[in-house]
Image (spheres, rainbow, N blue to C red):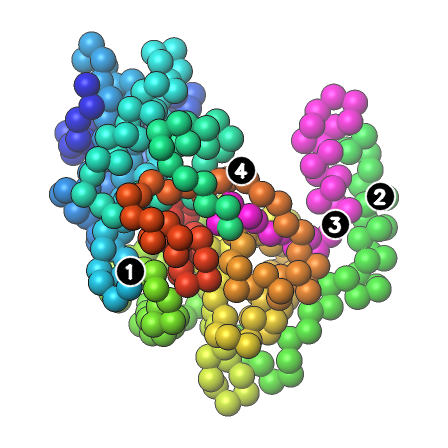
Amino acid sequence: MIRQFEREDIPAVVDFHRRIFGLPPGPPPPSDLYYTTIFFEHPWYDPEIRSLMYESDGQIVGFMGIVARPMRFKGEQIRVAVPTRFMVDAERGGALIAVQLLRALAAGPQVAAINDSSNEVMRQVWLRAGADLLYASSMHWIRPFLPAERWRRRIRERGGIAGLGGRFAWPLSRATDLLADRIGWNDFSVPPNTQVDRDPNAAVLLGLIESESARCLLSPVYEEDALAWQLGELERMGRHRRFCSAVVRNKKGRELGWYLYYHEAGGVSEVLQLVAVPGQEETVVAALLAEARERGAIAVRGRTDVRLLAALTNQRCVFAAGDPWSLVMTRDDEFRRVLQGKDAFFSRLEGEWW
């Protein structure tokens, strides 16, 4: 039986989460606060677009968290559902349960349901339930600052003899990356007198988002309080990562673009939102990469925006498709078409990934 998720179900769902993901027994982990905040107390709560549970013989065997997000499409406000925390009991019919939950989601009142963090298994489940793959949004880029070190870590993670070789390859990778630095691998061409104002408040970011939204057929709808709440959640949920944001301006103070990302010193920083006004893509991308390198990341990764493709390519970014995959369920053909092109403003900040 599929039914809506209620507040009183939180302890049982947290226990199901612990069972599915192997969390240790004992008192509920911190995620009980997550379930309360994200599914019942977030600024976009919509009683008609709710999380779903699948029960069998009185036990939870499937759960799909759903967050409603307001968006604007062709000048009109619409509702979009963003599934998250999708969990099924593999021993009780996992894939079939997942498909049934997705079909129940598709029957909801939203214009579309969008997922931007599916692995290969969930990609197949979504397609089986009638979803469409978002090809452009499933492309990701990564810009390594220490390419040899990134390669060494990936080899080390394989385990076995290859992993052992990766452990002992550090001197070689270190020497290779030092050479790459000397020949200008990480010389980013940020124009002189460019200003990078870090940690802008919600009011500043809201003005920038609204300006970008005016150029797009599909865009998110934010209010200052809601955006401030989300920025606070990003800081709280960062764990070992640091949430960073900045506005890029020219010497006259005019905004050229902005970026938000999770920084991980000694690791790969993940971009949540990267936007540039037309004609300033090179400057904004370079400013982001220069800052992340200065902070000590070994690479920066993000979801590909077709409007930034040339700038990312010029900065020696490497592109790959999938894992995570992006998918959409909608009965609106035009919405589906716009979502895949340059007239859509839908970043990781609006999706599940963050």
First-in-chain label (2 vs 1): 1
**Mark 2 residue element:** helix
Question: Residue visible at 31% across and 43% down?
Answer: 330
Return the residue at label 3. 147
Q: Is residue 71 visible?
A: yes
Label ID, residue 323: 4
Q: Are marks 3 and 4 in contact (CB under 8 Å)?
A: no
First-in-chain label (1 vs 4): 1
Span of residues in magenta: 137-163
Tell me the CA gap for discs 2 and 3. Answer: 14 Å
Question: Residue visible at 62% across and 65% down?
Answer: 310
Snapshot quadrant of residue 33: top left
Tell me the CA gap for discs 2 and 1. Answer: 53 Å
Q: Amino acid at mark 4?
A: Asp
Q: Are marks 2 and 1 in contact (CB under 8 Å)?
A: no
Residue 304, x across and y down, in percent: 54, 54
Return the residue at label 1. 73
**Mark 1 residue element:** strand
Residue 208, x across and y down, in percent: 38, 72
Frontmost residue, 340 versus 190: 340
